[in-house]
Image (cartoon, rainbow, N blue to C red):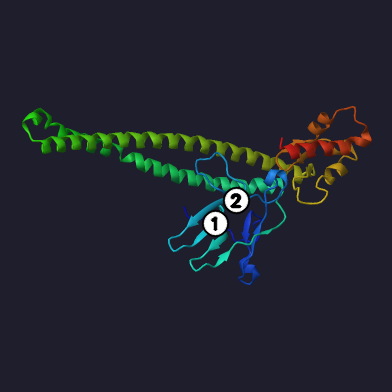
Amino acid sequence: MRIQSINNTNFRGLFTDKSAQNGGNWLMEYSPYSWENNNTSKMASKQRVDVYASSLPDNEEIYSRFGDGGENSKDILGTESYYKTSDGRMRRTITEVPSMNREESLKVQNKKYDLFLDMKNNEYKRLKSNVRSVPQDIDYAKTMYNHYAQNIPFGIFTGDSTQNRTAEGMRKGFNHLRDTAEKTYHSFQLYDELRESADSIRTKKAANAKEIELLANARKNGKLIDISRRDIDGASNVLKEALQSVREAAGRIVALPHKTVTLDSILKEIGSKVKSADIPSEAVKYVENLIKKGI
C-alpha cells in the first residue's frame, strides 16, 4: 500500500517533516498523543505495526529494509522518520514538540485507523488470493494420486522401480492435498483474526468520533475544561481555577489525556463532605490519580 507523506505544516502530528521549511536540511518533528507514554504526553518508543492487531501502537513503525543495504522507518501516514542509505548516510534526529490535546489526538488516531483498516483490507485480499487456488490444488492432488494409484492392482507383477515410483507419486499427491488443507485452515484462522480486529478498530473509531463531537461542542459552548496535555507546567491548574466557583463550573466536562469525564462525576467521587475551600485541590488530586493509574 502506497501512502503519501504528510508534509503539510498545518498538520499537527504525529511526525511532521519540516525539512522543506528548514532549507532542505533534515528536520523531523514529533507531537505526541495526549495519552502517550503512560499519560505523560511524551514520546513513546517506536513499535512495529501488526496488521492483525486490534490496536495501533502510539508511535507506530513500518520498517523497510532494501536490497542495496538501505533501510527506513515510516509511520502509517507515510512520514519517514528515519533512513539509512546504501552508502551509510543516516538521518534519525527527531525534535519532540508540544503534544496534542485529547481532541486533536483522537482526530489523528482516526486518520491512522482509516489507513490501518486499508492495510487490513489489503491483507484480506492476499488471504483471499491464497484460498482462490484451493480447488485447483485439490484437483491436482487428486489427479496425481489417482494416476499412480491405478498401478496398485498390477504392483505384484512389476519391478521394484515401478512400485517405488507409484508409492512416491501417491505420497506426493497426498502431501500436496495435506499442504493445501493446512494452508486453507491457516488462511481461515488469519481471516477470522483479521475480521475480528477490523471490527474492533471500527468500534474504536466510532467511539472516537462521538467523543470528538462531544469535545468540539463543549469547547464551542464554553463548557470544556481541558487538562489533557500533561507536558506543560501546572497541567491541572485550569481545573483548579474553574472550581473556584463550583456553581459556575456546573455542567462542564473535563478532558483528561486518556478519557473525557463530567465535572459532576468528579465532584460526586470526592464526596459531599469536603469543605468548599478544599474542593479544587481535592478534585485535582482525584483526576491526577486517574491519570497516573490510567483508569
Q: Quadrant of residue 28?
A: bottom right
Residue 264, horizontal then vertical, whole percent? 81, 32
Residue at the bottom extreme, as displayed: 23
Do callouts 1 and 2 mark residues in contact (Cβ within 8 Å)? yes
Label total for image: 2
Return the x and y of residue 173 as percentages of the image width and height.
23, 36
Residue 4, percent from left and from top:
53, 58
* Residue displayed at 85% across by 38% down: 249
Q: Quadrant of residue 177?
A: top left
Residue 246, numbered circle: none
**10 Å neighbourhood of mark 1: few (<14), some, or many (≥20)?**
many
**Label 1 SS:** strand
Which residue is under mark 1?
Answer: 73
Q: Nearer the viewer, residue 194 or 161?
A: 161
Measured Cα–Cα span from mark 1 to mark 2: 9 Å
Residue at position x 84%, y 31% in the image: 270
Label 1 or label 2, whichever comes before in sequence order? 2
Residue for badge 2: 46
- Residue at the outermost left position: 157
The C terminus is located in which quarter? top right
Q: Is residue 147 visible?
A: no
Q: Position of residue 164 (x, y in %)?
A: 15, 36
Residue 154 visible here: yes
165 relative position to 211: left or right = left
Query: Mark 1 is on which residue type?
Result: Ser
Q: Residue at x 86, y 36 (%)?
A: 282
Instruction: Using the image as rendered, state which of residue 74 and residue 152 is in the foreground.
Output: 152
Left or right side of 8 for 269: right
Q: Nearer the viewer, residue 138 or 72?
A: 72
Amino acid bearing label 2: Lys
